[in-house]
Amino acid sequence: MKETSFIDQNKEKWNRFEKLSQSETRDPDELSSLYMDITDDLSYAQTFYQRRTVRVYLNQLAQRIYTDLHIQRGESIKKLISVWKVSLPLEIYRSRKTLLFALVVFLLWATIGAVSTHFDPGFARVIVGDAYVEMTNRNIANGNPLAVYETDSHLGMFIRITTNNLRVAFLTFIFGIFFTIGTHIFLFKNGVMLGAFQYYFATKGLLLTSFLGIWIHGAFEISAIVLAGGAGITMGNAWLFPGNYTRLQSLQLGAKRGLKIMLSLVPFIITAGFLESFVTANYQSLAEWSKWTLILLSFGIIIGYYVVYPMIVARKYPHLLEQEEVVNTFPNKYFNLQRIRTLGQIISDSFRFYRIHFSSFFRINMFVIFPLAVGLIYFQDQLHAEMMETNYWFDWAKQLEIMIGFGFESDQDYLINGLWSVLFSLMIISVSYVFKNGQQVIRWKEFFLFAAKKLPLVWVGSLLLFFTISLIPWQWYFVLIFVIPFFYLNGVTASAVEEKAGRRFSLGWKYSAQSYGNSLMVLFLFFVILALFAQPIAFVGSIHDNNFVSSPPMPDLLDLLTDFVKNVCDTFHWNKWVISNYVRQLVYLIFIMAVFPLWIIAMHFLVYNEHEKETANGLKADFQKFGKRSKVKEHDVDYEED
């Protein structure tokens, strides 16, 4: 049939469909019938008029009503805004008692610190250390009591302070899992330190000076620590007092609520680091009114978002506040990939998929990727033998630089880095295989054929993401996180979508752009989870210096393990520094093998989300089932065939 005849024959039906889709009152039966006709026409146009305008028109027409039916128009950005407008304030309101309790406890410890310093001026030395007190005394004598905040490198100071503040906040939260005891220890430590430090300035007649200098950034920084404490107590209380839930279910809900509160703190912690580095550092040149304005404005924002606004949201959405969340400890093992998920469902299903299929993709990673990675690391360690003779302040960053070739100090670094991009692609393929296969048993021949077919396109699709992460210094990752979503899904799209090569790449860019908001939230969540679960293994900045003069200020499990290894090496007269760094690299590699698949799983769900919006395969299948009743119970699953 000629294109013009095809259009003349169907244009009235299409016009009717457009009017119905835009109408507030419409007959769902007529709409569904017309939709089925439209999809048939679209299939016909894709076959015979693939490069014609009518195909594009019909595709847009079908996609528009499909999006409307799922209420997903502008989902990514709207969902991102909705999280900050509704979801986070509701969680803050639900946790208001524990947040208030954390504030009271923190103020109590701060008061004890101040009172102890009042009766014993030497108490400040016990809390903050002799060196810090002596430095403060010298600064006071020089007429610049807060000279500690002055620096020649504002950017470097910003990175160090922000990293440390994030670490302290996350540790305050995560240690709440130990029956809230860990959180109380951090609140005690920081509260007493604040009270002693602030009162010490009062004994020198500098209370107002120190207040106007310190609280420019302290309003956000101290508030974040208190709120992180409230989040930790929320999680710990859920573990201690499960109520009508099982203890595991209650812990899952408490951790979820605590994580949401922690997510809300990230912008404030970053802002506090910026203020401390660029504003407090110049406090002497600021007018008094500007200091008061910044302090009052900061406290106003905190009170507004964490006290006033949650009450407004709770009154506006009482039905959401009263919803009782249900956690299924033994969830269904099947996943319908032809459906559109909300951000919350993507995150929830990602964790569920990870838990159910962990053994499958971890087995692939450990038997295939791990040995190859060990070989690459061995060659790197031999090339950079001198770098293996020391420890580093940011140990994880330096070790990864050696392992993966981030430093680009030789031609071999470029080669090794390129080979690591292949391993990263294989990690994506391993998760894709589990999605496609859907079985607990790995069929190795089938997997290797699958990997050989997928690897070239996945590798090309992942190059931009991998090399962007490789080339940008890790200190800039907090900025990079806003750029990555523009090409975030390219590699996974090349693996998960069955289209021609060029089509996969174009869809990768398209899906990345359309899913920007959701991808950004997933990235934030992934980095939060990575930071939280990495801390017990390797605290950020746990290595005190690179000359082995002093011990780490806060030893972690990896420090304890490597200390044991060093003692063994001393016994056998081996090179303890090199071998202990081998152990560190091995632990980091296993950690990557265990954690990165969760990130890749979430990327797959994002791709399937956008692909379903593009193709509407799930909705088409649902329309075909209208009026039919299955006599057999069906699973909620439809794994795509390769």
Image: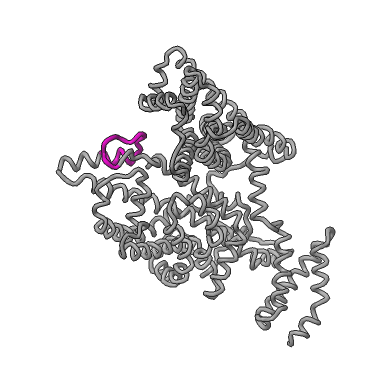
Residue 581 visible in the picture: yes
Q: Where in the figure is residue 115, as x and y percent of width and height? A: 49, 15
Q: Where in the figure is residue 331, as x and y percent of width and height? A: 55, 48
Could you say which is closer to the camera, residue 270 or residue 173?
Answer: 270
- Left-right relation of 394 to 630: left
Q: Which residue shows up at 65% across the image and 33% down it?
A: 300
Residue 249 visible in the picture: no
Helix, strand or loop: magenta stretch: loop
Quadrant position of residue 153: top left
Q: Which residue shows up at 61% across the image and 52% down it?
A: 343
Please say whether residue 561 is one of the residues in the magenta stretch. Answer: yes
- The span shown in magenta is 546-563
Position of 155 relative to 406 (above/below): above
Quadrant position of residue 626: bottom right
Position of 85 relative to 187 (above/below): below
Position of 184 relative to 275 (above/below): above
